[in-house]
Image (cartoon, helix red, strand yellow):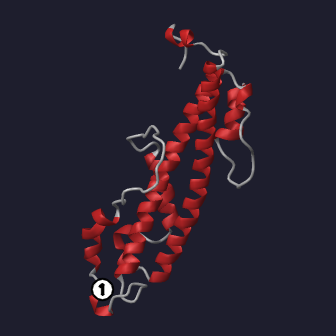
Amino acid sequence: MDAISAAQDRYGRLPEEPGAGSEPDLGRLGLDQLRTLRRDTLEQEADLSYLRRLLHGRMDILLAELDRRPGAGAARPADAAEPAGALLERLPAILTDAPSTVRRSARHVTLGPPRGEQSQLEADTLMGDVQLADLAAHPAEELLAALERLREHEREVSGRRQRLLRTADGCNAEITRRYRDGEARVDDLLAGGPL
């Protein structure tokens, strides 16, 4: 098994249990291996990011349905509850994110859904018997249970995503260090070497 395969097995596909495994020793990898690990890590991060967006969308819809119901935590009288069809009309507003107040560094953003079908299936499985097309037919207890499953999985996905981002950042820092310290040469890139 080559070094990059070992690194990916150990770090690219992160363990499911928190705390298992550790950060890769990037200094031991070759430049090509670092670039491959960085690319693979960012692809995995894009997959998790897409799944996370799907989970957030479902959570937002479930919360809006629960809020729409009379006496469901909202301070509105029972006769002011919206009809079930109003949820569909409000979807654009429900799924729109407010502008972020957190300043973040720029990252490459994948425009298409990476493994959209697999992520869609995973998000649907977490919903259980609750179908988005017919939320009004489910009691609040079922919606709350689905919401908790989604929240729990979102926390786990976010943790895995953060570990992948740290690995990608570490790869970037190590590649930069090698060029800065003269261990790698820009001339090799210009001569058609691997990126």
Q: Nearer the viewer, residue 112 or 188?
A: 188
Q: Is residue 1 above or below residue 146?
A: above
Residue drawn at (45%, 42%), measured in percent from left and top? 114
State whether residue 1 appears in this view.
Answer: no
Residue drawn at (54%, 9%), measured in percent from left and top? 187
Quadrant in the picture for residue 111: top left
Which residue is disc 1 drawn over? 81
Q: Is residue 52 above or below residue 27?
A: below
In this rendering, position of residue 96 left or right of residue 39 = left
Amino acid carrying label 1: it is Ala
Q: Nearer the viewer, residue 157 or 75?
A: 75
Quadrant in the picture for residue 181: top right
Q: Label 1: how many residues lie within 10 Å, few (<14), some (14-19) or many (20+)?
A: some
In percent of width and height, residue 132 lies at 38, 68
In percent of width and height, residue 90 lies at 27, 69
Q: Nearer the viewer, residue 6 or 41?
A: 41
Q: Helix or strand or loop: what does disc 1 sit on?
A: loop
